Image (cartoon, grey):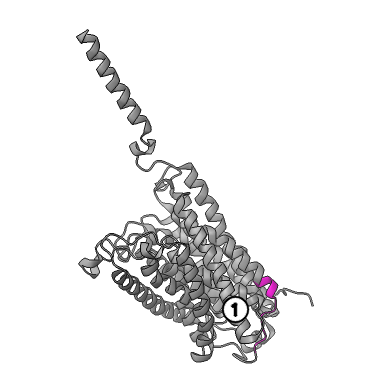
Amino acid sequence: MHYISRNLRAGSFLTLLVSLISIIPSDAFAADKLSEGNTAWIITATALVLFMTMPGLALFYGGLVRSKNVLSVLMQCFAICCVASIVWLVAGYSIAFGGGNAWWGGLSKAFLAGITTETLSGDIPENVFFMFQMTFAIITPGLIVGAYVERIKFGAVVLFSTLWLIFVYAPSTHWIWGGGFLADLSWLGASFKGYATMDFAGGLVVHANAAVAALVIAKVLGSRKGFPNELRPPHNPGLVMIGAAMLWVGWYGFNAGSALAANGSAGMAMTVTHISAATACLTWIIIEYVKFGKPSLVGIATGAIAGLATITPASGFVGPVGALVYGVASGVICFYMINVVKSKWNIDDSLDVFAVHGVGGMLGILLAAFFADTSLGGNGLPEGITMGTAFVGQLVATIITVVWAGIASYILLKITQAVIGLRVSADDEIEGLDITSHGERSYDL
């Protein structure tokens, strides 16, 4: 009986052990195991982000210019997509996400060296991660197009975009997302231990970088003929709305995809993205109605982009209440910054890249220090980090990013100017870039 009792106890123990093991997730025993669900979502998000540039951004910008230049804008966005793709393969991805050091990722992954179909980045294939990040590299120089439309040489667009991706975008991406020195701000002091710049989907990496470059190039290039009082309004507000709607849909991939997983974080990122955009739209047209007596289609579309750009860096950290505040703040501040840039600073940032994307992106970065806190409905700051500490960290990262983007963009612009020139002739500008630069017309009138 004692023997039988002992075996029963042993059998019960084994049964219990097997039961416990069976409820442990299988991936607990295998690091870097492929997740088919996450992979499927990031492939989808990649397509959505590419959709933002091709055709979303192209149509949004195309509708805002005069009819004699719309084709040139579409051509610039299309060409940048192709150029950025090749640059990302050759060196950009490696500079951004290679091992390297705190400043530079190196070239160990140039041409995707060492990356096979079996290589994982987390729990998704690295080639999928490569493609997802490529679409960010495509849209970022694409945003700059809005600053130089209707007066720049096509060759200058290609050369500047190539250099800018290599020396501005890729290093900045490495600093924040690739494990660089802005991904760990402990060098600022003991109170910053464990704190990384909160830029979930590109308030600095994408929007601030592009906007600062846009401001520099608009200043160096000079204003369009007739700026600011003699320029005609957008030739096709309907096209602007269509492009903005495509951007809005694609932005779900941009922000929710940055969770790199099909989970609750992605769901909340999508939620706050939509709420911020909708709130900014309403804020924008209320201001227009009060000031001008009529809300405009171009206004509500621009408000959407402002709300989307502003929530981007915080979309993985804030909650719905924060998104409402983001929407109102972006609608008000970006609206009035358009006048500041064009009237106060006298810079022809033609399609308001700095006022909407730059101001929005930086505003979103700074507000994240507060609205990420659980007391304001966010997901919570890192342990031991106060709102004040977080704000200082966000501000330092913003200053470093903006200063580097400004200085490097100016140098690269001067190199481009020396090699092939920047601005088309006065006659070409008057006739329009569609026919003078590309030999085609958008409309047969």
Q: Which residue is mark 1?
A: 286
Q: Which amino acid type is marked by label 1?
A: Ile
Q: Crowding at label 1, few (<14), some or many (≥20) Cα neighbours within 10 Å?
A: some
Quadrant in the picture for the N terminus:
top left
User: What is the magenta range?
Assistant: 231-240
- For the residue pair 362 and 179, the one nearer the viewer reads as 362
Quadrant in the picture for the C terminus:
bottom right
Figure quadrant of residue 108:
bottom left
**Is residue 313 located in the magenta-colored stretch of the structure?**
no
Q: Position of residue 248 (x, y in %)?
A: 58, 64
Residue at 50% across / 68% down in the picture? Answer: 324
Give the prevailing secondary structure in the magenta stretch: loop
Residue at 72% across / 73% down in the picture? Answer: 442
Q: Position of residue 128 (x, y in %)?
A: 48, 50
Tell me, yes or no, if residue 373 can be seen here: no
- In the rendered image of this protein, does residue 427 appear above or below residue 100? below
- For the residue pair 98 and 272, the one nearer the viewer reads as 272
- In the rendered image of this protein, does residue 93 appear above or below residue 417? above
**Is residue 232 located in the magenta-colored stretch of the structure?**
yes
Give the secondary structure at mark 1: helix
- For the residue pair 3 and 342, the one nearer the viewer reads as 3
Q: Position of residue 295 (x, y in %)?
A: 65, 79
Side (left or right) of 68 relative to 121: right
- For the residue pair 428 and 137, the one nearer the viewer reads as 137
Residue at 65% across / 91% down in the picture? Answer: 230
Q: Position of residue 155 (x, y in %)?
A: 56, 75
